[in-house]
Amino acid sequence: MWVGIDLGGTNTKIALIDEQGKILESKSFSTRSFRTPQAWVKRAFLEIKEFPRVKGVGIGVPGAVDFDRGRIRYLPNLPGWENFPIVERFSAVLGKRIRIAVDNDATAMAVAEWVYGSAKGYASAMCITLGTGVGAGLILEGKVYRGIDGVAGELGHFPLVPWGKACSCGGKGCLERYVGNRALVHWARKLGLLSAKEDDLSIVSDRAKKGDERALDFWDKVAYTLAPTLIGVVNLLNLEVIVVGGGVASAGRPLIGAISRYVKAYAMKVQGKRVKVVKAKLGNSAGVIGASLLPRR
Amino acid sequence: MWVGIDLGGTNTKIALIDEQGKILESKSFSTRSFRTPQAWVKRAFLEIKEFPRVKGVGIGVPGAVDFDRGRIRYLPNLPGWENFPIVERFSAVLGKRIRIAVDNDATAMAVAEWVYGSAKGYASAMCITLGTGVGAGLILEGKVYRGIDGVAGELGHFPLVPWGKACSCGGKGCLERYVGNRALVHWARKLGLLSAKEDDLSIVSDRAKKGDERALDFWDKVAYTLAPTLIGVVNLLNLEVIVVGGGVASAGRPLIGAISRYVKAYAMKVQGKRVKVVKAKLGNSAGVIGASLLPRR
């Protein structure tokens, strides 16, 4: 049995997962009700000790980690977690016999999709998550690609508009500023697809699924906005598959079909012919499933 | 002794290179004076058979190759070379004892810079060539990265301007359309830095080196145009070093210093701190030196 923990900016999910990646139990608690990472670890421990026969615990976190040393570097949306030695702290309460690993949440999701989901069987894949943030996990030549400092995959901070809007990352014109959840909600409101009080894009997804032309056009334009960066990555990395996940991906075919058409039509000949653009298979569970795989690898 | 061949759209360079990467002899002939790839192979063979103690021959070509099968896929600027089994044809004239390998020219240059030049000692590097075309060779986690079809590295066809100018690759807004040699010559003419008859950017480089403010400003703007895509790649791949080569790189510090400043200032915290942007060390010889390394690996 393995435990996967998905540390989110809002909620923490903890799941007990078997060798086949099946979720047997899952729990959730508010991340922000704990003042310190140490208090959060204690709370997580209370859940884990209820689970039987745990061999290992994996944690996916929304930010930069030092994978080899088992430390968090920093989490943009959770101040106070800088340089937290999360693996060491879990070891202190769980004991040395239990394997523990930490990784970036987008990387964990990519591993889940690679082992059990839409990227299964491919040697090179980019699994993107479209939500509040836009991130990616990379599988290159049959291995998880983390970059020299373990912070690779920041697709949301690829400049879409050269020297465009300032971003909280310190950069300009970042993709996330244009296709992150906040930007899309603002855009959908301007088009009258959401009221000023509504901030749930699944309303626009549902409309599109019912054939609403304006909602379909909205998702087409989201795909059109996102496609150039994906085309560039495909031309540069000659990937086999792009897996689209995250909350926004629930728009389904109106979004993902359009991304696929743009990417295949405008990427270079060999690259465009090769690449597939598909929806993530594991949905909201990819985070905990991917996390549970971290100590097993 | 090893032979490196740099098949260019205009000229072919052939060099005899020792185990330490030193060029002992080199020759050059016009690529386009041969009607067929087979005639070109015969011509190259005449040069190679003059060289003593040749253990292997490597060929760098300006386009897509099937590295494992030793075939050219297609060369955008040399029609008629599609699917040419270049390794087999060289084997037929040179004999089975001589090792032969073919790769993309940007990849060959990256290998040369990695083994002998500015990327030496790094596990992850992108070596870019700025010339008529804009290309890149990637070293990731201590290995040459070619992509699933061997066509990775097409940095020049990363969209800089979303849905911008149409490109001959079938894409839109490609970086090469804005910072390729042709675009830069056009731009320098508009600014009065080149006359209508001049098409040699080294004139503008020389002016900048002498402190000409307008020439310095030109190279700064070239860096400013190029930087967003490099920032994006650095954020996505968390590279250690970007090596800038190709004819345009002869602009030197006014260009490369500015690229370095923009990339380090606007990339994300960890990525920007890590990455170095440096000039290629091997200059025009990188092509043949890198090619000579291909059969040795």
Image (tube, coloured by chain):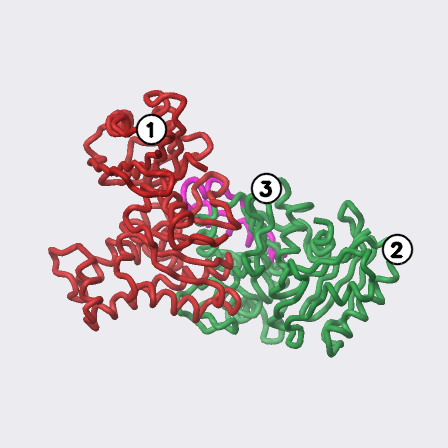
Chain colours: A green, B red
Residue type (three-letter) at the residue carrying disc 2? Pro
The spot of residue A17 in percent (x, y) is 79, 52
The spot of residue B220 in percent (x, y) is 29, 68
Q: Are marks 2 and 1 in contact (CB under 8 Å)?
A: no
Chain letter for the residue marked with disc 3 in the picture: A
The spot of residue B74 in percent (x, y) is 36, 36
Q: Are marks 3 and 1 in contact (CB under 8 Å)?
A: no
**Residue at disc 2, secondary structure:** loop
State the separation of the CA atoms marked 3 and 2: 33 Å
Badge 2 and badge 1 both on one subunit: no
Residue occupied by mark 1? B53
Q: Which residues are magenta?
A: A249-276
Chain letter for the residue marked with disc 2 in the picture: A
Few, some or many residues within 10 Å of mark 1 (<14, 14–19, 20+): few
State the separation of the CA atoms marked 3 and 1: 43 Å
Residue A55 seen by the camera: yes
Give yes or no for residue A42 being in the magenta stretch.
no
- Taking the image as shown, residue B278 lies to the left or right of residue A249, namely left
- Taking the image as shown, residue A81 lies to the left or right of residue B148, namely right
Q: Which mark is residue A122?
A: 3
